Image (cartoon, coloured by chain):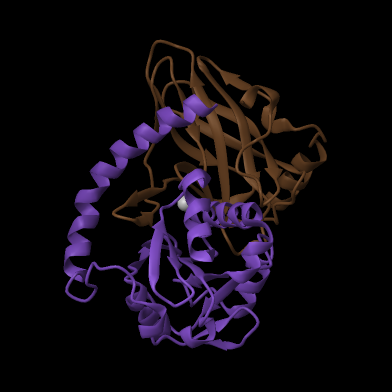
Chain colours: A purple, B brown
Amino acid sequence: MRRRQIVLSLAGLAGAAAFTLGLGAWRTRNRSVHNPLLPLPLTSMDWRLINHVGQEVTPADWRGRPAMVFFGFTYCPDVCPTTLLDIADWLEALGPDADRLTTALISVDPERDTPDALANYVSHFDPRIIGLTGSVGATARAAADFRVSFKKEPAGDGDYTMNHTAGVFLFHANGQFASIIDFHEDRRFAVPKLRRILA
Amino acid sequence: MKNTVLALSLLFAAPMAQACETFTIGDISVEHAWSRASIGTDRPGVLYLEITNNGTTDDALTGLTTPAASMPMLHETVVTDGIASMPHAASVPVPAGQTVVLSPGGFHGMLMGLTNVLKEGETFPITLTFEQAGSLDVSVDVLSMRVEAAACDDAK
Ligand SMILES: [Cu+2]
């Protein structure tokens, strides 16, 4: 099984390389808006979103706590459950220390991800995961602060999916950006990165 | 009508883990077909499975149909420069003598327009179309939302 997955991963890499050409063109156009830098410190961000229980949240609310933040959308059956399952797994590995961490999913699909939609979604993974959403403008503001890209992609019949930055961003308790955990990164690397921001 | 078909198929659902069953047509065999339980029917469902080509001719999975979804599609999750997207895949190549896996973070069946809630422990039928081998009916096991692979003794 494992070996077969590796074979498939290699096939995936080839596909990814082919896809880079198309996506590259799109990224270049957006680069003038989004400087390809690392996320701002949380203390320099100024987004304002609504959490899954309907309360307003700003970066100031996270002051003094290390944070793990990622972007996604709940109408995504593959990448987002995979990331959420990875995160639930890391939180479990951290044990009680994980309670000192702010863990948040920021939706890139605010049209469908209402606070209620987020609430019934994140509850299936770990109760410590906060869902955040807002207007399209508020979402764009947050994405810009994190240097995150997102884009609506038609999927036929009026339906759509979202392309979005898939990494998980880690911040120290003082708000400084610490590191990124890449999509589906091995927990042998992910959990120590989390321990570093909890230290 | 579709709902009746699905209801009938669910009647035949065995309590055993069907994801471990192997379905074969010609040189193609499919196993570990599974999906995740859905929250309602608004969000798309997912399909994962493992295809082995035991023959000497390359084949490809070119389509899906199922009473469980009005618009099932083949997708491939691709992460490029940190950005995840899941473009439509016209087909999934299954080269001679190889096994190809549809698994989290890679190729997957995207079940858009779910006709029923996918409930953990149930199964639903799906018809896979292969370029060479033709059509194959497979039973898909609905597993928990928190599962990342089918649990079969031979899956290690
Ligand atoms: Cu998909």
The percent coordinates of residue A146 (x first, y second) are: 36, 73
Q: Is residue B126 above or below residue B113?
A: above
Residue A78 appears in the picture as rendered? no
Q: Is residue B31 above or below residue A47?
A: above
Q: Residue furthest top?
A: B56
The percent coordinates of residue A149 (x first, y second) are: 32, 68
x 65%, y 60%: residue: A125
Q: Residue furthest front?
A: A199
x 66%, y 50%: residue: B146
Q: Quadrant of residue B136?
A: top right
**Quadrant for the N terminus of chain A in the image:** top right
Q: In the shown orientation, is residue A6 left or right of residue B29?
A: left
The percent coordinates of residue B41 (x first, y second) are: 64, 61
Foreground residue among A75 and B104: B104
Q: In the shown orientation, is residue B55 left or right of residue A85?
A: left
The percent coordinates of residue B63 (x first, y second) are: 47, 38
Q: State the count of labels.
A: 0
Residue A54 appears in the picture as rendered? yes
x 69%, y 44%: residue: B142
Q: Is residue B127 above or below residue A46?
A: above
Q: In the shown orientation, is residue B27 left or right of residue B40?
A: left
x 74%, y 51%: residue: B119
Foreground residue among B27 and A148: A148
